Image (spheres, rainbow, N blue to C red):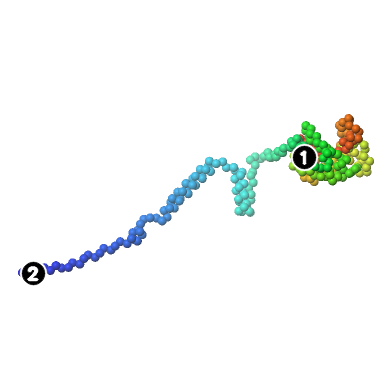
Amino acid sequence: MADEEVPQEVAPPPPEPEEDDDDESSGSSVDPEAWMLSFGDLVSLMLVFFVMLFSMSTLEIEEFEAIVSSLAQQFNPSASIKRPKPSADLDIPKVTTREAYDLSYLRALIGDKLADNALAVDIKLHELHDRLVISMPADTMFEPGTATMTTAAREAIDKLGTVIRFLSNRIDVNGHTDPDPISSPIYPSNWEFSLARAMSVANELRRAGFAEGARSFGLADSRFGEISLDLPVEDRYRRARRIDVVIRKDLDEWNNR
């Protein structure tokens, strides 16, 4: 009997090496800085957008230069400040226009302000077409034969000064006397006497806040003929001795010369 062939054992093939997951992930082609491309596109679009807005806006050159100069001075104090230069060799200067107050409004305001003063009964307000006249009796405003004001008169002038301190209207202070000549070594005539009293009131108005200053005039008895002849002589003389604070309708051109 023929010899039977004995089957030989065949060794199994070696196992194929398993692929590592980490190798797969490390071998991927994803760029970690790819987001910068999108961010760059966004910034570029925003820049274009603001450039478009700037091109459509109107730039005030003077205000822009003032802001730049202010910032430059803030961060660099040693830098020189740029001043706007005139567009021509000769520029027309800017003129500040002031408005005078309405006389009817001033009359009501001054009347209310002086209502509680001791001299309120004797103070008269007369509104004419171009002026407001505040007549104050000199007999109760001053010590007899002097230009020294009484306490009640100072209080009245101080209250009046608080009203007119911001006025642009022209203001005059006129002193008046009666026709009888004064006999005083200090005042040679009624002219000097009336001027001294007018200046006393004007100075008190200045101390009360009327910084513009009022013009003072001594008119003596030159306006005595304007007082009604129907009044008794005593009343005419009493009304003649007065101080008139005259508020003009126009501006104070005297102080602007």
**On the picture, is 136 further left or further right than 180?**
left
Specify the quadrant that holds the N terminus.
bottom left
Q: What type is the residue that disc 1 sits on?
A: Asp
Residue 126 in the image, given as x and y percentages of width and height: 80, 34
What residue is pinned by disc 1? 112
Q: Is residue 77 above or below residue 107?
A: below
Identify the residue at image location x=30%, y=61%. Answer: 19
How far, Cα to Cα, is label 2 from label 1? Answer: 153 Å
Identify the residue at image location x=89%, y=34%. Answer: 236
**Residue 176 — which label?**
none
Of residue 68 and residue 232, the one placed in the foreground of this image is 232
What residue is pinned by disc 2? 3
Q: Are marks 2 and 1 in contact (CB under 8 Å)?
A: no
Secondary structure beneath label 2: loop
Residue 32 in the image, given as x and y percentages of width and height: 41, 56
Query: Sequence-wise, which precedes: disc 2 or disc 1?
Result: 2
Q: Visible in this render: residue 18?
A: yes
